[in-house]
Image: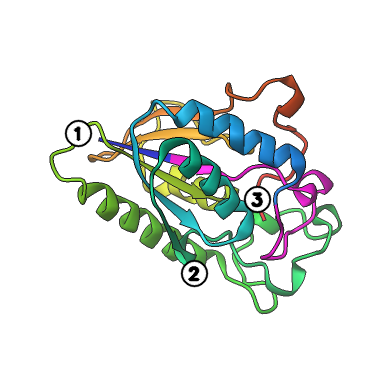
């Protein structure tokens, strides 16, 4: 019983290290990454897709749906943390601890509110996977954002002993999580489906 946690494909603002407005689309490279991920998932028994409703995640989910035939359900619970009035601004010109700061940016989410939403998002994913009933081979793909994946990895699932959550979460990085408690992660931040022309940029911003 498996859940796939997937970060969306690359955007131009990821590479530019800018906090992204909600309507940021995938770049051409991001679309190529999404297509490569979809080809990888075509044989992984994806039965349903749960996706953030933000365009960069939804476009990634649509590539998976095209390859697998699985239906997409969208939910705002899977959106990236809302940085409010700071969206559209260069990350490196703001506070160095911005992505982990506790307080809410102007018109944005505090870390506590975001953590609660991440918990609700993971609970929804578990409910959707449970709805498969006795289909032990059916897989749920969850397409979301870097900070939300990090929140799930650090508080909702179990990583292998002495393995920390990655400092950088790759675009279209794949994480495989057991849907049964303690929700062991068997694959972490894997981008092996990307060839050199679409490789993840390790210097790109992996949240926000």
Q: In x, y percent, where is residue 133?
A: 15, 45
Query: Which residue shows up at 45% across the image and 30% down it?
Result: 41
Marking on residue 136: 1
Query: Which residue shows up at 49% across the image and 48% down it?
Result: 143
Looking at the figure, which quarter contains the N terminus?
top left
Q: In x, y percent, where is residue 140?
A: 35, 43
Query: Which residue shows up at 65% across the image and 34% down it?
Result: 33
Q: Nearer the viewer, residue 168 or 24?
A: 24
The residue tagged 3 is 207
Q: Nearer the viewer, residue 3 or 106?
A: 3
- Give left or right: position of 184 versus 11: left
- Give left or right: position of 136 versus 32: left
Contact? badges 1 and 2 (CB < 8 Å): no
The magenta segment is 5-25
Q: Secondary structure at mark 3?
A: loop
Q: Is residue 163 above or below residue 24?
A: above
Q: Earlier in the sequence, mark 2 or mark 3?
A: 2
Looking at the figure, which quarter contains the C terminus?
bottom right
Q: Is residue 96 magenta?
A: no
Q: Earlier in the sequence, mark 1 or mark 2?
A: 2
C-alpha separation, residue under disc 2 versus residue under disc 3: 16 Å
Q: Secondary structure at mark 2?
A: helix
Q: Main secondary structure of the magenta part?
A: loop
């Amino acid at each position: 019983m498996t859940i796939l946690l997937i970060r969306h494909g690359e955007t131009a603002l990821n590479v530019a290290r800018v906090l992204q407005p909600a309507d940021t689309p995938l770049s051409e490279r991001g679309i190529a990454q999404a297509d490569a991920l979809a080809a990888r998932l075509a044989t992984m028994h994806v039965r349903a897709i749960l996706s953030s409703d933000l365009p960069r995640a939804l476009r990634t989910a649509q590539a998976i749906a095209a390859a697998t035939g699985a239906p997409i359900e969208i939910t705002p619970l899977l959106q990236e943390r809302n940085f409010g009035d700071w969206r559209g601004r260069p990350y490196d010109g703001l506070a160095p601890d911005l992505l982990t700061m506790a307080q809410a940016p102007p018109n944005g989410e505090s870390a506590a509110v975001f953590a609660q939403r991440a918990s609700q998002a993971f609970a929804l994913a578990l409910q959707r996977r449970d709805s498969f009933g006795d289909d032990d081979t059916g897989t749920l793909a969850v397409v979301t954002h870097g900070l939300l994946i990090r929140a799930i990895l650090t508080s909702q699932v179990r990583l292998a002993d002495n393995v920390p959550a990655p400092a950088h979460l790759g675009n279209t990085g794949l994480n495989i999580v057991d849907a049964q408690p303690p929700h062991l992660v068997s694959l972490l931040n894997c981008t092996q489906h990307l060839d050199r022309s679409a490789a993840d940029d390790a210097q790109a911003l992996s949240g926000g």
